[in-house]
Amino acid sequence: MGYRAENLLGILKATTPMLLGMIGVIILALPLRLFEGIGPTPIIPLVVVFFWSIYAPDYLPSVSVFFIGILQDLLTGGPLGLWAVVYLVTQFVVMSQRAYFHGREQKVVWLGFALVAGGVSLMVWLVMSLMSGVLLPVRTLLGQMAATVLIYPLFGIAFGQLHHRVLVEG
Amino acid sequence: MEFLGQDRREGLGRRVNSRFVLILLILVSSLLLLSSLYSAQASVFQKAREGVIDATAPVLAIFSGPVGYINDVFGNVGDYFNVLEQNKALREENAELRQWMDEALELRRIVSSYEGLQTYQAPPDAQPIDAHVIGEANDAFARSMIVNAGRGKNVEVGQAVVDDNGLVGRIVDTGSRASRVLLLTDIQSRVPVYIDGANVEGLLIGKTRDKPSISITEGSDDIEITPGQRVLTSGAGGVLPRGLPVGVITGQGRNDDILVDLYTNYARTRIVRIINYEFPTVDADGSDEAAIQDETVEAGAPAEG
């Protein structure tokens, strides 16, 4: 009995980052319309992928990242595979720079996230422009990325607490 | 589920196959992306989209209620500050609408007398389906909404979606209890329209900006288009009914685009109506057998000759 409960808790802990990513995707599909539709909705799954790829990639295996991306593609109705590629490439790039980010100040990590968000914007814009055959306006995308970068410290702290207090220690 | 049961002792050391799996998945999703470029409407993808819409509809429905309530409260705060101007504008609009009502009543009387004529055949009635907006793609390029009516309520792909202001978009995916509406601002959106008073037919093309533009398909060379002219659906292509209000022309953008200011306000669209409109077809109910025979004769004639 105790063993099973522990097992269940283990599964819950191991899947928490993936669940958070999926909640982030659901938030992207809610009619939030922040500030009368002017405020863009931050892309929380990107924060989830970035954070766990730096601090504990084992808690967010690439299969989970893949499913988060596919869910986002299916739910927002975009081309299938776009966000899966974006999140997986993000994980690849971030994991290759893990050693640099470890033990750095949060400001530096935030800057790193801003760079990643810039790269992601470029990638999404390029793919969507290629698919639609015209150079698309970038303003909405940059607004959304700016919102994501702005909220990063908040979620970074929250995820940090969650990871260390609950997932690892608890 | 290999990642289960790992504790912090192993936490820092990555597994050997991790990078291999990662690269493999990047390849897989790139392939998916490439294939969706060529076959966006492939039945597998379509099924997956519909399944996900159906699966997430209950979750979205639960959250969209409180979200809408909060939006209403915050929207109202803004309204308190300009209540006087709004009141004045509404009174003026009301006076104007009363005149229109008189005219409409008069026209209704005339039309009903025409309908009494024997040669008149009424066009089929549209059967509206009402639905709530429960989801919205908050994506930079994909513009769509999810509404809580699906195949269970006879919603079909291609049907027009309107709100109390005008055309919102059209249905692109239908699950059993929820559907996706492609908005007019999406880059994939193409809606046949005409400009009232200019005798011009065109396509309304979404550009992910707030204002879609019109590309003219039919009309004379020297077309006079002035800001303020109304844009309505033309019904060309036989998908959307003719005459749904879309917006007004605001002028020309860069590249000589004709920009359209939509009547509908996507930031406030909460309740929509899906128009289940069937185009009149000759062999719709078989009652008009002479017409069907005429057509088969006509269709057969060139083959014989």
Image (cartoon, helix red, strand yellow):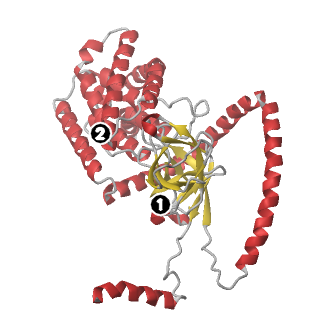
Does the image show residue A64? no
Q: Disc 1 vs disc 2: Cβ atoms closer than 8 Å?
A: no
Which residue does the image show at 50% across and 52% down from the upper left? Answer: B181
Question: Residue A130 has which mark?
Answer: 2
Q: Position of residue A61 (x, y in %)?
A: 28, 33
Badge 2: chain ID: A
Which residue does the image show at 37% across and 56% down from the upper left? Answer: B46
| Viewer-proximal residue among A135 and B65 | A135
Above or below A7: residue B245: below
**Disc 2 secondary structure class:** helix
Q: Position of residue B132 (x, y in %)?
A: 61, 51
Quadrant in the rendering for residue A11: top left
Q: Position of residue B211 (x, y in %)?
A: 52, 39
Disc 2 marks a residue whose amino acid type is Leu
B180 left or right of B98 in image: left
Q: Are marks 1 and 2 on the same chain?
A: no
Question: In what quadrant of the picture does the N terminus of chain A appear?
Answer: top left
Above or below B97: residue A18: above
Badge 1: chain ID: B
Q: Position of residue B94 (x, y in %)?
A: 81, 47
Question: Residue B158 has which mark?
Answer: 1
